[in-house]
Amino acid sequence: METILPITAYQPKHHIRIVTAASLFDGHDAAINIMRRIMQRSGAEIIHLGHNRSAKEIVDTAIQEDAQGIALTSYQGGHNEYFKYIFDMLKERGAGHVKIFGGGGVLFSLKKSRHCRIMASPVSTLLMTVVTWDSRA
Amino acid sequence: MGLQGMINDVLQQCDFPLGEHVNGELKKISKKDHLSISRLITAVENYPDENQHWIAQITSKAKDSKVPVLGITGTGGAGKSSMIDEIIRRYLLDFPDKDLAVVSVDPSKRKTGGALLGDRIRMNALISPRVYMRSLATRQSNLALSKHIKQAVDILKAAEFDMIILETSGIGQSDTEIVDHADMSLYIMTPEFGAASQLEKIDMLDFADVIAINKFDKRGAQDALRDVRKQYKRNHELWDVKDEDIPVFGTIASQFNDPGTNALYKKIIQILEAKTSITFHSTVQFKTGESEKIYIIPPHRVRYLSEIADNNRKYDAWAKEEAEKAALLYALKESKAHFEEKGIAEKSRINSTRSLIG
């Protein structure tokens, strides 16, 4: 029988700073809390904003904190616009290097999004849905 | 892939260096250009050796700067972030033309090197474009302050902010480090410090210019205020000063327009003006006084609805009991009348029936 080895944490070469939050009008922060704890445990510095944060607040924070990445959970269905706002605003303000990671609930589908093409490279979708469901079971 | 696998992917993508080389940022440094300030702070944090040449330049520029620095420290969970939020809110209201920068230092985990920088959760006043805020991890978990904190503050001074707030993680003894980096310092604690003798161990009571006893709505707050004032008097040998003039304030930072927090804010501005050559020209009148929890429902009325419900239930039970009694009484009374009226006739009919059977 094949045994599945536990995946060991990635060892970062540089100091990694990531902004985490749940999106605007969204209080579902169970998933992002689990994700950020694993990031912390893997040695990242997490600037956590809690829930119900607007695109501007996220971008302001990423710029002021000079983070390499933003990880967000969106459960309320507005993610297509929300992520695009963040993506555009970062570029507009000279912080296009900041990577965006998103995940969310059942409504979360970037494949169907017409913005998906634009965002395809910087966005990697985490299936946080699973985590949300697990934590609620 | 698993959760760790997903996170590994995220971290791998984010694992690129920042601040190794600084180009135009140094020239662009101004309080309006958050991007440049951020990158410079990252540079001193990540690559202090590579960037030595310009750090010296910043340090000398900051030396002549008169930007006041307010240092804030206190025990974990005492409400430092909430208090800073309240101070920023009042500052922005009081000085419509002034800017402000905040540096918050939180501990890195010794075991993993990771850190949760969570001060922004509580700070809603940061939404103002006049505020710059930076969270730093200590990156050495045995210290309250990050090693590069001085350079970070120097960069903010060089950017010519009108005021800088420096907050440290409250981990005991090394708290007093903050005094070296700030023009004045504020110590935030709660009424729950244990016995009065515990206060003798707190170094910051020697060094803090102002002390806030936050969460003043907690039980024993008045006693705490008296004890801390007494200890402050002992530490500073202020035997003749009146209790009210000791800079110890009871505050409830979570309460809107809290009079204790107002008094604390005014005192901070007053001390900063006295300690630096800056005049702030405070314009807003804040209502000051002792903090008292303003309750929507006063404590002795908290169970008010439940009392009404209890009373109603008791009344219902009593009424039901009485109704049963009345019903029984009525039944007896009716039975009695029935037998009295019709009893005789019935009896004779029964008797005649019996005789027929017999």
Image (spheres, coloured by chain):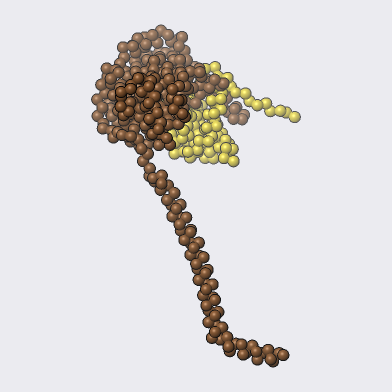
Q: Position of residue B37 (x, y in %)?
A: 38, 19
Left or right, residue B97 beside residue A79: left
Taking depth in this image into account, of A55 and A12 the one nearest to the observer is: A12
Q: Position of residue B305 (x, y in %)?
A: 43, 52
Q: Is residue B66 above or below residue A1?
A: above
Q: In which quadrant of the rendered image does the C terminus of chain B lie?
A: bottom right
> At 37% across and 31% down in the image, what residue appears?
B250
> At 69% across and 92% down in the image, what residue appears?
B356
> At 68% across and 89% down in the image, what residue appears?
B354
Taking depth in this image into account, of A62 and B211 the one nearest to the observer is: B211
Left or right, residue B1 beside residue B337: right
Q: Is residue B234 above or below residue B48?
A: below
Toward which corner of the image does residue A133 lie, by quadrant? top right
Q: In which quadrant of the rendered image does the N terminus of chain B lie?
A: top right
Left or right, residue B145 beside residue B242: right
| Circle count | 0
Residue reaching furthest to the front: B239
Chain letter tied to yellow: A
Residue reaching furthest to the right: A1
Residue B127 in view of the camera: no
Q: Position of residue B137 (x, y in %)?
A: 47, 21
Instruction: Write down the colour of chain B.
Output: brown
> At 39% across and 27% down in the image, what residue appears?
B228
